[in-house]
Image: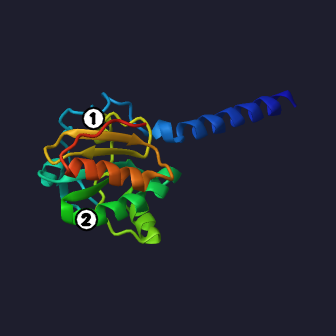
Amino acid sequence: MRRIIILGVALLVGIWLIMVRRTPQSDCPPPDSMAEIGQPAPAFALSDLAGRQVSLSDFKGKVVLLDFWATWCGPCRAAMPVLVAVAREYADKGVRYVAVNLREKPEVIRRYLKGAQLEIAVPLDQYGSVARKYGVRGIPTMVIVDKDGVVQKVHVGSSPGLKAELRRTLDALLAGKKAEATE
């Protein structure tokens, strides 16, 4: 009887350890450093779902909404349609949305995008190397990069006022003003 109890406890501890390793924070790679406001955005090049190469330099002269996300992340799923809508609203003003997926299989991402009825390009950060360069500690993390390739705002998480906040930030950047960090 004692062996059964010990085995049961060991099994429960093992299950608990597996669950802890799957929390959102554990899937975020340890950051090299935080993306710093006023500093050049770290360069990157990733393949997207279609196999095309996507790099930050592709968007030179544009304002970039860089979104680090995953399909299993509830706040990411809530924020993504807002980010897509705002990027479309500001597309003619030179704003682009780049949805960098963290460490998921392409088929999982495609299934989510189809179900959510989102048609966007998704660069794949399969090893978390770009997230590490940007100092991502939790998702969603949104980094707004100005037309000169400089980080102007970092926002972690999702909130009911996200759309209004993004509009204020983009309006300020497009008017030549600088933004700030928020977490």
Q: Quadrant of the N terminus?
A: top right
Structural distance between the alpha carbons of marks 1 and 2: 24 Å
- Pick whichever, 116 or 81, lies toward us: 81
Q: Are marks 1 and 2 in contact (CB under 8 Å)?
A: no
The image quadrant of residue 62 is bottom left
Q: Residue at x 29, y 66 (%)?
A: 88
Q: Which circle, 1 or 2, is nearer the viewer?
A: 1
Q: Is residue 105 above or below residue 85?
A: above
The x, y position of residue 23, in whole percent, is 54, 40
- Pick whichever, 25 or 21, lies toward us: 25
Instruction: Give SS at disc 2.
Output: loop
Amino acid bearing label 2? Ala
- Pick whichever, 80 or 27, lies toward us: 80
Mark drawn on residue 86: none
Q: Tell me if 107 is positioned left or right of 12 in this view.
A: left
Q: Residue at x 20, y 37 (%)?
A: 42
The image quadrant of residue 110 is bottom left
Q: Residues within 10 Å of mark 1 (few under 14, many from 20)?
A: some
Q: Which residue is mark 1?
A: 133
Q: Residue at x 36, y 64 (%)?
A: 85
Q: Is residue 69 above or below residue 37?
A: below
Q: Residues within 10 Å of mark 2 (few under 14, many from 20)?
A: few
Mark drawn on residue 50: 2
The x, y position of residue 105, in whole percent, is 39, 56
Amino acid bearing label 1? Lys
Q: Tell me if 114 is positioned left or right of 86 in this view.
A: right
